[in-house]
Image (cartoon, coloured by chain):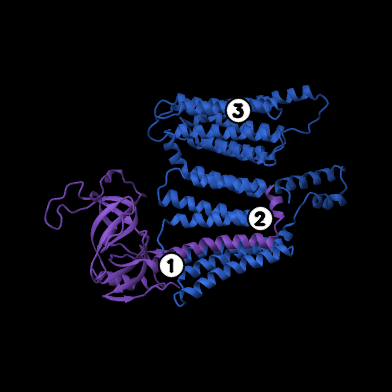
Chain colours: A purple, B blue
Amino acid sequence: MITRLLSAIPVWLRILIVFLAQAGVLGAMIAGKMHTLRTGTELILDTAPVDPRDIFRGDYVILNYTLSLVPAHLLTDPEGVNSGDTLYVTVERTAEGSAGAVLGLSETLPPPAPDRVTLKGVVDGIRQTALEVDATGAVLSEREAMRFQMVYGIESYFVPEGEGGALEALRNAGIGALRVLVAVDAEGTAAIKALIVNGERVAEEGLF
Amino acid sequence: MRNPLYLTQLKRDLDRWIAAGLVEARHREAILASAGEVRLMQSLPAVLLTLGVILIGFFAMSFVAANWSAMDKLPKLLILFGAMGLAYAIGARLIARGRGALGQAFVLLGVALFGVNIMLIAQIYHIRAHDPDAVRLWALGALGAAVLVPSRPALAASLVIAGVWSWMEVVDYDAAVHLPHLLFIVAAALVVQAFAWSTGLHLVMLSLVFFLVLNAEALRALFGLSWLGFMAALCLLLLTGWAKGQVLERFGYPFARLVTHYSVFLLALTLFLLQFPEGPGTAGLGLPLLGGLGALALALTGAGLLLGRVSLLELVGAVGVVALAIGLPLLVPGDDRGAGLQWLTAAGVIAFYVWMVTVGARTDDRFLVNWGFVGFGAEALYIYFETFETLLDSALFFLVGGLLLIALGFGLERVRRRIHPQGGTEGKA
C-alpha cells in the first residue's frame, strides 16, 4: 500500500520533502540557539577547561564552570533527584555581569527577578565535595557536602584544529584568565556568546 | 533481483540438469536471465558509486574535523544546506531519468551530508548536548529518506547509524536495555517488508543480533536471570522464532525462510555457548519464563505440524531443545556442572547439529546442512580440546557417538528403502 501511495507522488517532490524535513530539523537547531543569543541576558562564567579531541567534530575545549557543581541541599528533596533530571539554577548577577553565588535550585522555572539569572541544566551526576568546611569555616554536614554535577549545554567550545593548546595555556595561567560570556534566555537556555581572555572579549559569536 | 542464494542454487541445478540431458545448454543463460540474475559486471557501477559516496561522506566528516575556521557562519551554513540540497536534487533528477543506481548514490550522499550538517551546526553554535541524540536524529533522517524516496542504501545506512547510536547510549552512557533501538529496528523491518527487500531483512536480522549482544547483560539483569537462565531463555526464544517462521512459510510470507534460517543459526550458536561454565551466581533461572517460552515454542511447532510444515522429526528436535534448555538450568548444581552433565550437554548439542543436517537434507535446505556440519565440526573440536575428564573419556564419547550415528544412518536408509523400494542411491544425504 505504501509503495502505491508513494508512486502517486513524483520522485522530485518526494526527495524535496526529504530535503525540507531534514533542513527543517537543522534550521530548528540554529533557530533555537539564535533565539537564545538574541534575547538572552548576558552572564560571565568562570571556567576550568581541558582539551580533548573529538574525531567527528575537530578540536574543542571542554569547559567546566564554577557553576558546574551546585550544592544539592538548596533543593527541598535532593535525594529524589537522579542523573538526567532537569534542574534550574538561579545565580546572582553581579554589577560586572558575572555569575555570583548560587541563590536557588528548583525543579521548575522560577519567576524572573532583578539581578538574578536562572540557567536550565541537566544533572550529570551526584558528588560529595571534598571540603569539610565552608567558606566561613562552618563544618559541612554530609547533606551540605552533596553536589549536583550540572550540564548546561555550553560545555564545548570548538576551536580551529591545533588551537586548543593555546586555550589550555590560558587555563593554566590562573582563575579568571579564561572566562565565558553566555546569553541566557527567558527559559533558562544558555548559549556561548564570546570568550573573555584576561578581561577582553575575544572570539565573539555573531548570529550568522 | 532474485535472492542470490536461489540463483546460486539454480546455477548448480542447471549445470546438473544440462549434464543429465534434461536441459539444453543453449537455454542456460536465458533461464538465468528470466530468473532475474544481475551479473556482477552490471551491478559493479552501482557498487563502486556507493563506495565512492561513502568515501565522500568520510571526506566531509574529516573536513569537519579539521574545523574550517576561515569562513563566517553564513557562508558556512549556505555551503552546508547547499551541498545537501544539491546532492538530493541530483539524486532526484537521475532517478527520474531512470538512472536509479547513480541517483541512489546521490541520495545516500544527501543522507551522509545531513549527519555531517548536524555535527557542523553543533560545532558552529558550540552546542553541547547528549551526543547520541544527534546520531539518533541522523538515523531518523536516513530512515525518512529511505521511506519517501524510497532508498535501499538509505535504509541500510539508517540501520548502521542506529547501531552507532545504540552503541553510544549503552557503552558511553550506560543506558539500561536500549529499547528505542529495538523500536527503530522494528520500524525498519516494516519498511523492509513494505518494499519486499530481502537484503534489507538480512540487515534487520543483523541489527537484532547486535541489539541482543549489546544489551545481553542489561536484559539478563532486567529479567533477574543468571547467565545460564538467560542463555536458556534465548534458546527458547530462537526456537519460537524458528517455529513461527515455519508457520509463516505455510501462509506464503515471503521472508519466512530467512526468519527460520536466522533463528536456527543463532540457536545453534546459543546452544554451543550454553556449554560454557556459568559465571558467579546461579540464582534466577527464571523457570516460569523458560516454561512459558518453551510452551509457546512447542505450541507453534505443533501448529506447524498440523499445517503440514513441520515433520515429526522436527517436532522431536524442538522437544529436545526445550528439554535441554529447561532441564540444564534445573540440573546444574551451583557453579559446577560436573562431568556427567557436561557430557549430557555436549551430547544434546551434537544431537542438535545432527538434527540440522538431517532436516536440511530432508527439506533440501543447504543452509541447514552446511551450518549443521560447521556446528558439528566445531563441537567435535571443542570436545577434543576440552577433554572433560580424560582423553580416554573423549575417545569413548567419539566412539559411542560415531557408532550411534552410523547405526542411525543405516536405520534411516532402511526406512527410506522401505518407503521408496524402487529408489536408487540418488538423494542420499
Viewer-nearest residue: A2 or B323: A2
- Residue type indicated by callout 2: Pro
The quarter of the picture where residue B408 lies is top right
- The answer to whether mark 3 and mark 2 are in CB contact below 8 A is no
Do the residues indicated by labels 2 and 1 lie within the same chain of the protein? no
**Eye-nearest disc, 3 or 2:** 2
Dot 1 amino acid type: Met
Three-letter amino acid code of the residue under disc 3: Ala
Left-right relation of B415 to A188? right
Labels 2, 1: front one: 1
Give the class, few, some or many, for how many residues have Cα within 10 Å of label 3's Cα (few <14, many ≥20).
many
Determine the CA span between mark 2 and mark 1: 34 Å
Residue at 73%, 26% in the rendered image:
B413
Res B337 visible: yes
Residue at image location 86% in from the left, 50% down from the top: B27
Q: Secondary structure at mark 2?
A: loop
Question: In the image, which is nearer the foreground, mark 3 or mark 1?
Answer: 1
What element does badge 1 sit on? helix
The disc placed on residue B318 is 3
Q: Are marks 2 and 1 in contact (CB under 8 Å)?
A: no
**What residue does disc 2 label?**
B150
Label 3: state its secondary structure.
helix
Is residue A56 at all visible to an observer of this figure? no
Name the image quarter holding the C terminus of chain A.
bottom left
Q: Which label's residue is closer to the chain start, 3 or 2?
A: 2
Mark 2 surroundings within 10 Å by alpha-carbon count, few (fewer than 14), some (14 through 19), many (20 or more): many
Task: Find residue B183 and report its horizontal and vertical position in percent.
Answer: 53, 45
